[in-house]
Image (spheres, rainbow, N blue to C red):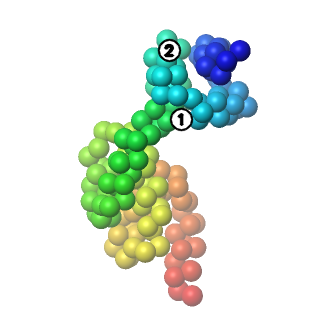
Amino acid sequence: MTDINIILSNLKVFHYSPWEEDKLEECKKLLADMSKEELRTIMHSKWMDKGNALYPTLFELFFKDELKNVVIKLNEMKTLDLIQELKETKSSYKKEKIPEILLNRYESMDDVERKDVFKILLRKGLVDKDNNKQIEELKDL
């Protein structure tokens, strides 16, 4: 059975039931080595939809070049502009990437920016309430 057939058969099986973690990881690995045409075939399969657990990986691989440019532009933006972009964007990809960028910049921010960013990171589950206390303790040292 070819890689594409393995993925399509798993898509069909797990369309009606939750994904098994090992099968999902296997399919993600197989996707990484596929051509653009094979990815397009899977993307347009009747068993694939945006709610599928495999969809984010497929989306990132299929639009790899375009998404790389989006991430470059986001990294070039100032922190306040990123916060505004997060509020205004309808792109789920940007809503996922902006908090990650903010988390990476967190240590280099001033206190005003940190307060706003911490709320965002807390909402997104990237930090917990105790993390702010730990960060403040480290800052005092």
- Residue at 37 percent across and 59 percent down: it is 75
Q: Say how many tags the image has.
A: 2
Say which residue appears at 34% left-offset and 39% top-offset: 91
**Viewport quadrant of the C terminus:** bottom right
First in sequence, mark 2 or 1: give its number: 2
Q: CA distance from mark 2 to mark 1?
A: 15 Å
For the question of whether residue 92 can be seen, the reply is yes
Up/down of 47 relative to 34, above or below: above
Residue that carries the numbered disc 2 in the rendered image? 45
Residue for badge 1: 57
Location of residue 115 (image quadrant):
bottom left
Classify mark 2: residues with Cα within 10 Å, few (<14), some (14-19) or many (20+): few
Kind of residue at badge 2: Ser
Residue 42 percent across, percent down from the top left: 52, 20
Q: Which quadrant holds the N terminus?
A: top right
Nearer the observer, 105 or 140: 105
Label pair 2/1, CB-CB below 8 angstroms = no
Q: Mark 1 falls on what kind of element?
A: helix
- From this view, report whether residue 86 is shown above or below residue 6: below
Quadrant of res 30: top right
Residue 114 location (% of width, % of height): 40, 70
**Going 30% across and 39% down the picture, which residue do you hit?**
90
